[in-house]
Image (tube, rainbow, N blue to C red):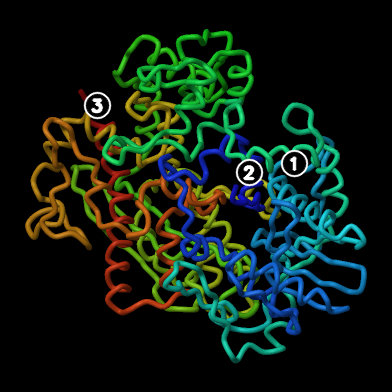
Amino acid sequence: MKSRYLTKSKFQLAMECPTKLYYSDKKEYSNLKSEDSFLKALAEGGFQVGALAKCYYPEGVEVKATDIEEAIAETQSLLLQENVIIFEAAIRYKNLFIRTDILIKNGDHITLIEVKSKSISSKEKQSFINKNGIVSTWKKYFYDMAFQKYVLLKAFPDKRISSYLMLTDKDAICHTDGLNQKFRITKEKNGRVEIIVADDISQEDLANKILYKANVDAEIDLVFKEEYLDSRTFSQFVDYLSDQYQQDIKIKPKPGAMCKKCEFKTKENSDIDNLKSGFKECWTEAYSFKEADFSIPSVLDIWNFPLKNKLIKSGIVKISQIDETDINPEPDKKPGWSASQRRWLQIEKIKNNDNEISIDAENLKAEMNSWTFPYHFIDFETSMCAIPLSKDERPYQGLAFQFSHHILHEDGRVEHAGQFLFQEVGKNPNINFIRALKSNLENDNGTIFRYATHENSYLNMIYDFIQKSRDLIPDKDQLISFIKTISKSKEDSVVKWNGDRNMLDLCELVKRFYYDPKTNGSNSIKQVFPAILSRSSYLQNKYSTPVYGADDGIPSLNFENWQWIRKDGDKVIDPYTLLPRLFEDIDSSEEQVEFLFDDEAIKQGGAASIAYARMQFSEMSKLERKELTKALLKYCELDTLAMVMIVEAWREMLTN
């Protein structure tokens, strides 16, 4: 039988769910999780950080062979030296296989360094361990490291192994301009990512290190001591996974809350692709589900419910099995539904086959009566750079590069009042961004809306950026005052404020006052907007002709004679699906971005942050840049128009 190596990526997959090993290499199973390393490089910055780490070891030798046997032979040859530093060392023990980021051999001592783009504070004593063991947000990194160290211990039993995580230091300050631009991202013909390091990278660029190396041997020892599947030791678990994977045996599924994010699902109309669903196979095997059961929401679909695993382990997996005591809906001290009441509302509607909306009209009307016209709707598009763009910046400085601004007037007029997209390569957009936003919003005292907490978080980041900036900002005081007016401070902020025009969170209003079963519990604007559009005859009538963008109608900055309401039979087509795709590589939907990345900040920024990173850090033609710019402007405009339409629909509902 041909060797099937259990690699560190396969091991990480098994730590999510051992059954996934069986589906991972089979083309007949749908896999929604893109393995496009180029897109990951754009968004996460991991490849750039990896290239920077290698610059710290100029005497290092890279194993460039992609063939496993060739790479192993090349590594073994290098390890014959008494002292050597190897990048991408290929190590095999039986049918376990790893490629290490940095491997340093000094006599009988081997140092393993794993480079991650995740940030850490070098000034504060970083603890990866709490009373429950490894901190949950760090576990996947230590499982990865533990697997690598285990393979090294087995492959080199006569060597002493030390393990380090090299992470971005969020307290470090970059001492040179343009460091990020010295690590350009490109995609080779075979799809592999290559980082082109500039020839002029200098000792000054590298002198003040923005990466921090932390010893993690104690954390790995804890991982080694844990028990795994059916009370196996770490060593037994690795051997078991290796054996099952080698023989291509499916490990018996043990479903849980993690199944919600299983990538081995099929999309709608998947029969066209004729692909199997690993998710369905697992739930059929575990709970005797029939095809009809998958069309009904399950425990996995309950909104924001922390006790899903508890219910699943007790055998409660269908909504019909849940009773009120499982949810315990209790009011809180705020108007509208509490989180538990909203969960129970969702469940009741499913159990009663009730597909009608629920609206807390009294509280929503009271809320809306407190608003001041004209209403302003704002959406930010943002990004973060692991390696700073400019001098005096820190890793993962928040970059606000785009906004859209719609206004709804009391007489029902809608205007796309402004937009901003910073396209200059290698420059921080924050000051230009906040100046443009100030210019858009300072002309009246109308209520300002955002959707979710993202915009407020970035306003706080820009506040900190301006306060810490060593550059001369002539209007610094005015910008600071403006930020404080339209936002509220972070909980841990030294300086506290809550602005007179603090942006209202439209998503929070959806959660407390409005529920549509068509959203299946989601509060994402990408779900709420199409659902409300499909129900509101008012919106359908108003936007059924191409008035938005027409010369004699509502002005648009990006659309001409655009008809927002289009139907497939009686069904209103989701307007987001009518826009040009930001990438040919991926769908622009939230689901695709969610499966592509693990990082929450990247998911929230979505495809727009990837598009911006591509414009900043990769080579592209003028035509590509132009088309990508047009697509970004259209997406951001629709985001704020969607917010306008939600409020318009509510006004009409409460009036009638």
Residue at the image point whose x is 46% and y is 21% from the top: 298
Instruction: State the image coordinates of residue 54 (x, y, percent, origin top left).
Output: 69, 76
Ranked by sequence position, the earlier of labels 1 and 2 is 1
How many residues crowd around disc 1 within 10 Å: few (fewer than 14), some, or many (20 or more)? some
Q: Secondary structure at mark 1?
A: helix
Residue at the image point whose x is 38% and y is 52% from the top: 378
Ranked by sequence position, the earlier of labels 3 and 1 is 1
Q: Which residue is mark 2?
A: 246
Q: Which residue is mark 3?
A: 653
Q: Residues under labels 1 and 2: Cα distance?
A: 10 Å
Q: Which residue is mark 1?
A: 239
Instruction: State the image coordinates of residue 411 (x, y, percent, origin top left).
Output: 18, 43
Q: Amino acid at mark 1?
A: Asp
Q: Are marks 3 and 2 in contact (CB under 8 Å)?
A: no
Q: Amino acid at mark 3?
A: Met
Q: Amino acid at mark 2?
A: Gln
